[in-house]
Image (spheres, rainbow, N blue to C red):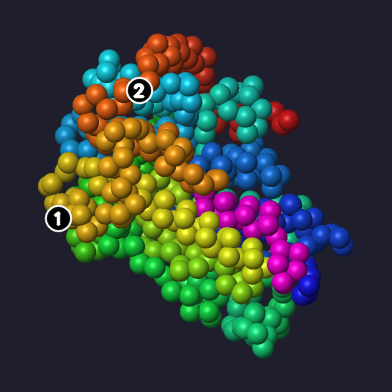
Amino acid sequence: MGAAVRHVVIVGGGSAGWLVAGLIAADHRGGQPDGLQVTLLESPDIGPIGVGEGTWPTMRDSLRRIGVSETELVRRCDAAFKQGSRFVGWVDGGPQDVYHHPFVLPQGYTEANLAAAWLQRHAQLPFAELASFQPHLCLQGKAPKQASTPEFAAVSNYGYHFDAGKFGQLLQHHCTTRLGVRHVLDHMEGIRSHDNGDIAALHTRAHGELAGDLFIDCTGLASLLLGGHYGVPLLPQRQVLFNDRALAVQVPYAQPDGPIASQTLATAQAGGWVWDIGLPTRRGVGHVYSSAHTSDDEAEQALRRYIQASGGPAEIATPRRLRFEPGYRQTFWHRNCVAVGLSAGFVEPLEASALALVELSAVAISEQMPATRAAMDIVARRFNEAFTGRWERVIDFLKLHYALSRRRDSAYWRDHVQPGSMPGRLQDALTLWRHRPPSRHDLPRVDEPFPSASWQYVLFGMGFRPEPGAYGAGRDDTDAAEAAFREAATLTRRMLPALPSHRELIDHIHRHGLHRI
Ligand SMILES: Cc1cc2nc3c(=O)[nH]c(=O)nc-3n(C[C@H](O)[C@H](O)[C@H](O)COP(=O)(O)OP(=O)(O)OC[C@H]3O[C@@H](n4cnc5c(N)ncnc54)[C@H](O)[C@@H]3O)c2cc1C
């Protein structure tokens, strides 16, 4: 049988540590006599990374599950709503080069072959703008819900943009006051092992030994337990996704009560791309780039040019410099230690998948929490297999944004289309998609990170076109597809006047809050 798992020790107090702590404690009666004991150890010397401002709609489920109020999130984390991403300059760098990746599925997506009807009759229109109302809401600065819509409910599917530092503080407060998580502010200085190689306890500087049954490594890029102690290597992904540096800065609005973007704007640059995230009180702007293709100074100049061109001030604070090695661990769960967050891996923030993988990991650990040490190795094997697949899929999806680009204006874009930089999995998929659109057959796993609709939005947004006549063959549901396009247009017309502006909704929440259900 082996010993019962009673005490979970999480090392690290960044977004990953607190999300894992919250989800496990909420599911397992944290701190109750009949529940799991959950302890989070956080170094007072090392702050959280402090970036990571864009989330997916999954965050709504996570917060609801943990019991955090959406009103509190908006009020305390400078949070706003995110309805997807807008890509500028990725296809050919020309003046019309913009496409959307919304969070809402295309209208009628499961009922008709929309791609075929789009190509046959509407190919001059962008796919996302024909098949979904959401890009139009974003372009008009609309909120994804009304003031009367309850917490976490959506008229138009959404995640959040928020201040990552404040988000960690909100979760910490909630986990320690409501969910029975014990917070130990101390520095881990070493590890004591059992004879079999399991971790027995952590040495802390001031609190002595911290013993536990399961240890969750949320120590950020340092990966002190899984990478440092166990030596589980990082599988580098630099050959596929070149970006390894970022500059991040906070930019004030020219008009404090001006519109707030409800999409992450991702604007291609010569050696990377710039993210632009609208919070209620400021923008978070950053340049993520490849050090093999762009110097730090060139990257900073490009960032400054972007900020000025987008209406920001001529003078900005000195940007923070971040470095990372793109990659993920060979395994994530080893013996009685599992890594979540940056300690498990990180590849550039395009499509903001990092926190979504944290949420998926935390839910997987919590739902499969091994009752005993003997059960742990089975859970670990399954976890490793599932998350290796998820990382591979995330990498393929991000590479899709580069692999189809027709930009050839710099070595960065030329190198991105070299066959050697392309995962074979993605190459295979692109071959199949010349004859049929991405579908669930390409994505057979439970909890795929990106649904097939996301692959379609990016594939078609990036200008991919199938073999002539290919998508229409074998299925005649043009009428159903046309009805879906009309439905998207009708919804757009109805929603635009009915929804408040994004800023109006945020102001309403600050003053009155949202209903809780
Ligand atoms: C440029 C950039 C942009 C990003 N943008 C996004 C985005 O838009 N969306 C998204 O989902 N993700 C994004 N991410 C990723 C996101 O920031 C992280 O996934 C998220 O913040 C989780 O970080 P973490 O908690 O794993 O690590 P960290 O925040 O680095 O936390 C590490 C913790 O470990 C603790 N620690 C370290 N050593 C010790 C020790 N010896 N003893 C005790 N404690 C210790 C520290 O005190 C700290 O609390 C981005 C990342 C980068 C680099």
Name the residue carrying label 2: 474
Q: Give the percent coordinates (x, y) of residue 309.
A: 24, 39
Q: Nearer the viewer, residue 262 or 397?
A: 397
Q: Give the percent coordinates (x, y) of residue 204.
A: 65, 81
Q: Mark 2: is the Cβ under 8 angstroms from ligand 1?
A: no
**Magenta span: helix, strand or loop, mainly?**
helix
Image quarter in which the N terminus is found: bottom right
**Quarter holding residue 41:** bottom right
The stretch of residues the image draws in magenta is 356-375
Q: How crowded is mark 2: few (under 14 residues within 10 Å), some or many (20 or more)?
A: few
Task: Residue 404: tell me if it is visible.
Answer: yes
- Residue 347 position (above or below residue 10): above
The reply to whether the magenta stretch includes residue 362 is: yes
The reply to whether the magenta stretch includes residue 396 is: no
| Amino acid, disc 1 | Ala
Task: Residue 89: tell me if it is visible.
Answer: no
